[in-house]
Amino acid sequence: MTQRIPLLLVLAALLAPVSAHAQAEGFLSVCGNRAASVAEVARTCRLALETGALDPEQELAAAINLGGALLELDQPGLARDAYDRALALKPASALALAGRAEARAALGETGLAAVDWNRAVDLAPNDAALRAARGAFRLRAGNPGGALADFEAAQARNPDDRALTFNRALALAELGRDAEAEAGLSRVIAADPGDTGAWLNRARLRAARDPLAALADYDRAVALAGDWSQPLVERGALNDALGRKDAANADFRRAWELGHRSEALNARILEMGR
């Protein structure tokens, strides 16, 4: 898993209500409001665009904000349409390209998403947020080398960013550079001992080399995870490998109670007699 890094900024400054039409002004004031709910941003941005009373700069910003809201509402097809509208107004908008890349990735259009990401970064090569977000995309798309380059470029500008340190560690792990990855995750843990993902991923790195240290990390991840069952499943597997069957069964049963389902877990629960 990667930690999400904020990408698209709400362009409130561009959405200052300068339209002569009061209705459009009202919609714009919410469309560019950081405090509004995502659903309300989507609704008012759409209504503002439908008025036909926006100047090109306002229309661009409203379309970008609409796309971002629709992405958060898990409507990537409609988000892509909004970004298409923005790019028709300004083909060299790095923000719109990045947003469309995210929408295309969510739709499974990985190749087209990569093209949009590359265009966005080419337009704004010094934008650390864009580099970080493209890195997250590349990591998910199976390109850890490219992801690492992006994370390191972003971290050169934000050396204390824990999300970048975390994501860089994931890329290093994918590249087989386990010692560097573990060191990065240890830095995240030192800065934020409550980061469940850091404990979990460090446990994964340690499992083969030092299973007892990995088990201690899994213990911390389980304690922090609440109702998230994945750390229990993985700790159960390690307990099993260490011959601790009772502890493994307890982990697997608790993961089942929390709603985790997989063929392997289903079989184990049946073996235990539910």
Image (cartoon, grey):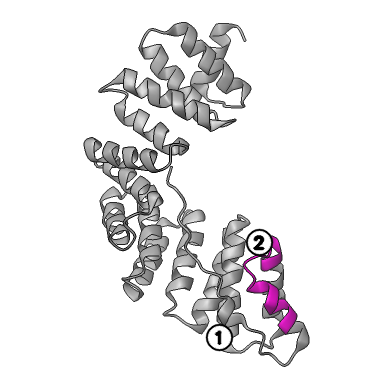
Segment tinted magenta in the rendering = 25-41
**Front in this rendered view, residue 120 or 208:** 208
> Label 1, label 2: how many angstroms apart (C-alpha)?
22 Å
Q: Position of residue 186 (x, y in %)?
A: 32, 37
Q: Residues within 10 Å of mark 2 (few under 14, many from 20)?
A: some
At 24% from the left and 42% from the top, the residue drawn is 175
Give the SS element for disc 1: helix
Examine the image and state in which quarter residue 121 appears: bottom left
Q: Which residue is mark 1?
A: 57
At 61% from the left and 81% from the top, the residue drawn is 15
The quadrant in which the C terminus is found is top right
At 35% from the left and 33% from the top, the residue drawn is 202
**Front in this rendered view, residue 70 or 225:** 225
Q: Is residue 92 above or below residue 156?
A: below
Examine the image and state in which quarter residue 101 appears: bottom left
The type of residue carrying mark 1 is Glu
Q: Position of residue 225 (x, y in %)?
A: 53, 32
Q: Main secondary structure of the magenta part?
A: helix
Q: Which mark is residue 38?
A: 2
- Residue 84 shows in this picture: yes
Question: In this rendering, would 67 be left or right of 138?
Answer: right
At 38% from the left and 54% from the top, the residue drawn is 161
Residue extending farthest to the bottom is 20
Examine the image and state in which quarter residue 208 appears: top left
Question: In this rendering, would 127 be left or right of 60?
Answer: left
The type of residue carrying mark 2 is Val
**Front in this rendered view, residue 114 or 187:** 187
Q: Position of residue 167 (x, y in %)?
A: 36, 48
